Amino acid sequence: MAFLTSPALRRPTALFLNSKRLNFDNKLDFSRLFALTELTCNQVDNITSTEEIIDIIKKNEPEILITKEMQLPVKVMESFPSSIKLLCEAGTGFNNIPTLIARSKHIDVCNIPTYSNESVAHMVITYILNFAAAIFNQARMLHQQDRTNFKVFQHPIYEIGGKNLGLIGGSGTIGTAVVDIALPLGMNILISSRSGRLPSGHKYENNPRVKVVTRDELFKESDFVSINCPLNAETRHSVGEREVRLMKPTSFLINTARGAIINEAELIKCMKENVIAGAGLDTQEAEPPAEDSEIWNLENVFLTPHIGWRRLETRQRLVDMTADNIEAYIKGEKINVVN
């Protein structure tokens, strides 16, 4: 009996502009991407020179362009050769890409909206647990050869059961993943919504420990505030001095979304005045912050270098889901197109 086989898919040319940002440890398996495309990996973490980006793209003339959290200036997009038909952002946020210009050039832009939900949620909870047990402060003391904490304990620590966790962007996929972990830990959830309710059919729509409140109420009532919304024109600098001063002096602010959602200069001012107990920032307005930024030296601000998505399994999932987007494109389908 003869077996029917599907025709082989064509292999378009593809260029990953900054593959080292994703595969910084050379532990990821790109074999599916290489099987689907004639892939060239530019093994750098980032490119900031507009001219260099334009030159690399012109030399390769790819049909598919892949980026990871790399800013594509308008000038770069306007100079794209006609060969480019698909721009894949290997991540969730796409504020680094001028999507309207891409659409005017008939280029589809796609992202990966769900690859890091659990990993980022774990990052939020990691910060919460560390703050509740003063782990950061205790570790800092030991690194400074200060062992007095072992004689007279000096930091407030507490259980997180019964504490209020406020989620900015809490009804989205990552916010919901945070709730999935926080509820079994005994926390109460506050989610801000202009409509006063969760979207119809949301899994926590009728949960008595998930409360929808106004934005101001969220800042005032929360013991921990976690930012989990996307960065756009509306959310840029939407958390600043006004919002921080609404918070309890014992509360903590956590950002695992995009750094520019927080007005960093205003946050620094508040943290220097000890308006709140602490802030945990996995993302900053500039990554990394400027060498002379005061944020490096604030004892109540704890920084991590945007590691919410960097776990090995998370990054491999990202590679595989990028391949899903590209395979769909090759088959004439469209998934995760954002423009």
Image (cartoon, rainbow, N blue to C red):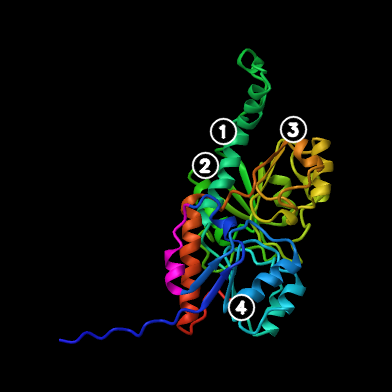
The N terminus lies in quadrant:
bottom left
Residue receiving disc 1: 159
Q: Which mark is residue 186?
A: 2
Residue receiving disc 4: 61
Residue at the image position 60 percent from the left and 30 percent from the top: 135
Q: From the viewer's side, name the closer residue of 256 and 91.
A: 91
Crowd tier of the residue under label 1, counting other residues whose Cα lies within 10 Å: few below 14, some 14–19, many 20 or above: few
Residue receiving disc 3: 299
In terms of sequence position, does the residue under pointer 4 or pointer 3 come before the other?
Answer: 4
Identified by mark 4, the residue type is Glu
In terms of sequence position, does the residue under pointer 3 or pointer 1 come before the other?
Answer: 1
Identified by mark 3, the residue type is Glu
Return the x and y of residue 298 as percentages of the image width and height.
Answer: 77, 35
Q: Distance between the residues labelled 2 and 3?
A: 29 Å
Residue bounds of the magenta highlight: 27-36
Please report contact status of discs 4 and 3: CB closer than 8 Å, yes or no: no
